[in-house]
Image (cartoon, helix red, strand yellow):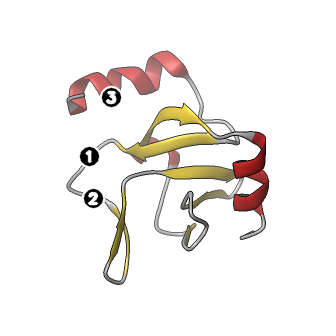
Amino acid sequence: MDIKKKVAGITSRGVLELGDIVEPVDRTYPLVSGCARYDNAVVVSKDPFVLVSQCTTMRWGATVSPSGFVKVGKASKELLKSCKKRL
C-alpha cells in the first residue's frame, strides 16, 4: 500500500483505538529499538499515546504520535492483554 493511500486511510478511519495494530505512515521512520526493527505495533494507550511491539519486547511513548501511524489490523484480546503488561 502506498503512503498516499495510507494517509487517506487515516482520515477515513478516524482516531486510532486501543488494540489497533498500526504501522508507520512513512516507512522511512520505522519502529526501531537498538538493532531491532518492528513492522508494526499495538496501541495500548491513547492518552498518552503508547505503542508496544506484538512480541512485547519494546514500548514507545515520547517518540511516537497518532498522526504518524495507520491502522492495519486489530489485536486479539489475548494479545492486547499481554501488550498492556508493558504499561
Residue ID at (49%, 34%):
71
| SS assignment at label 3 | helix
Q: Is residue 46 visible?
A: no
Which of the numbered marks, if any, corresponds to residue 26?
1
Is residue 18 or residue 8 the one in the foreground? 18
Residue placed under numbered mark 3 in the picture:
6
- Quadrant location, the N terminus: top left
Which of the numbered marks, if any, corresponds to residue 80?
none
| Mark 3 / mark 2, whichever is N-terminal | 3
| SS assignment at label 1 | loop
| SS assignment at label 2 | loop
Is residue 40 or residue 61 the one in the foreground? 40
Mark 1 surroundings: few (<14), some (14-19) or many (≥20) residues within 10 A: some
- Quadrant location, the C terminus: bottom right
Contact between marks 1 and 2 (CB within 8 A): the answer is yes
Where 87 falls versus 1 (above or below)? below
